[in-house]
Image: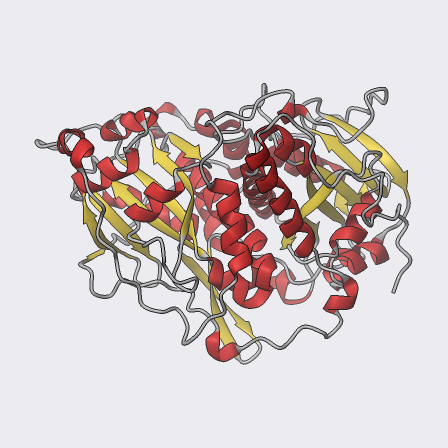
Amino acid sequence: MPTVDCVPQEPQPGRQCRPVSELSREILERVERVFEFHEATGLADDAARGVSPPLDEANRPNSYRVFADRPLIPLPTHLLDAPVPTIALLSDGLTALPESQVGPPHDLRTLATWLYMAAGRTVERRIGEKRATLRASPSAGALYPCEIYVAAFNLRDLPPGLYHFSVKEFALRTLREGSQTLAAIKRGRPDLEFLKSVPAALLVSTIFWRSAWKYRQRGYRMALLDAGHVVQNLVAAGNGLGIQTMPRLRVHEASMREVLGLGVDAAFGAAESVQSMVVWADDAASMPSSPPASAGDRAAPAIGPLDIIERAPLSPAYLTYGSIAAVHEDCVAPGMAVRMIRPPTTGTCAMPPDEPGREMPLPNAVIGEPPLRHVMSTRRSATSFDRRLALSRSPLLSINRTAFLGGSFHPVLPDGPYVGLVRPFWVIHDVSGIDSGVWYYHPPADRWWLMRRGSYRLESSYLCAEQALAGDAAALCWICADLTTLCSEAGPDAYRLAHLEAGIVAERIHLAAAALAIGCCGIGSFYDAETRGFLATADGKWEPLYAVAMGIPSGKDANR
């Protein structure tokens, strides 16, 4: 076991584990329970050394949800192109596209392309004696806890209604009719009236049992990271097709459960929770002769409970993780007024204010970058890196800026185009033009701090649950959040939102790295307390949520 160069970070006076704020007692109690869950799900090295029971492969959850008894609508397979360069799109959004490519047809072909690019099946990979089918969005352990539902309102060749995107069949399964769907989604939400005049909204849900099967309680955190991947892919793919997207990371939990046809007593193995709604926000080009909005508006005051939609079991048996259900309820339950997360909360910095940091020269323009559709359909997570090969400074700075200066999503509203909840700590192992050591980057100021110089390959491998690729990588990005400040000022849902944003920026790193032919791998299993100590910020409040390793792929990855 290596000696980690760090400040001890067990509970102590130097680390504020409980929030201090003016929130109500009931909300503060929820925040405290969220902190208790976070600490309880931290990975410790003694628990990871063969103590965990083996996985129950017989009960591995099916990664494909199929509503076999519902009407099937095959999706077109002659898909649209998305020729825009990936990094330009991630940095500039729709403005990276020529005007002629903005505003694609509001039809099934555009929807099919959007779904395929964001979450469709792309490649097969052999894992031991088995072959695994990978998807456009990465997933911890290839468990794919996320589902996508399409609330169609004004598409030319798809009747208004709620549909499930069946990844395995590359088809839609009809679940509800249109007026019922619209009325239920916007019930009690006047801010969602605009949905009646857009083509569609995509709902990203998580099935926590899929992640909990392998990661147990920590599966809640892993599922949220995966949901962030899917949300970012939907935004990137939508923008690449010329679609104006409007992501919302906060939705009404009870209404969305009802829309999906889940009872309040749904078993843990079947339950789902909607984490985000990504709206196709263009004005509908053509409205149906009897628009669903009219029927929904008339029916909304009197609409009763929606019917339960039966779901086939995903595994022969399951374990109930009441702690996951409880922490999610603490995050999303009503009790706080709906509020945006704004400055100064979104500008929190890990460095003392009297240390100005330094600027890094902007990287050179990327030349010959592959288009988005190619990147999204061929991207894979690296499984090993060649530690003999260095990265150059320009691509790393480009990837960092693309990820952390790409803006936040509702309800996070920073005062600039940067992420509002998470911050990166980079451990540079071998990047030409940048000193090896631990660096902090502050997106609002676009400045870097060298926290300490040194070689930390051994420590990186150890902290990432002793995974060699973390130490072999040229650089390791720790995505962290000041959870104490966030939850104290924004309430318990800031915990869920921070994990979603961590997944979002990690997927930006994935896509930008793939566009530059650089290997990339997300790491959600790491030693929490030891990592917190290794980063050693002055206030000790920055919690690692996710790690992303980058480098030059080796072995089979180098030849794919």
- Quadrant (top left, top right, bottom left, bottom right) of the C terminus: bottom right
Q: Which residue is found at the position 85% from the left and 38% from the top?
A: 14
Q: Is residue 560 visible?
A: no
Q: Residue at x 53, y 28 (%)?
A: 412
Answer above or below: position of 281 versus 162. above
Q: Position of residue 403 (x, y in %)?
A: 61, 36
Image position of 514 with respect to 216: above or below: above
Rendered view: 524 above or below 284: below
Task: Out of 445 and 350, give the one closest to the viewer.
Answer: 350
Q: Is residue 142 visible?
A: yes
The image quarter in which residue 184 lies: top left
Q: Give coordinates of residue 160: x percent, y percent.
A: 18, 41
Query: Which residue occupies 86% across, 43% down?
Result: 436
Left or right? Give the position of 223 relative to 312.
right
Give the vertical position of 269 relative to 116 (above or below): below
Farthest-out residue, left: 289
Q: For the point 44% across and 46% down, which residue is it?
A: 373
User: Residue 446 at x, y = what percent?
Assistant: 71, 25
Picture quarter containing residue 200? Answer: top left
Residue 191 versus residue 291: which sits nearer the camera? Answer: 191
Q: Nearer the viewer, residue 342 or 461?
A: 342
Image quarter (top left, top right, bottom left or bottom right) of the N terminus? bottom right
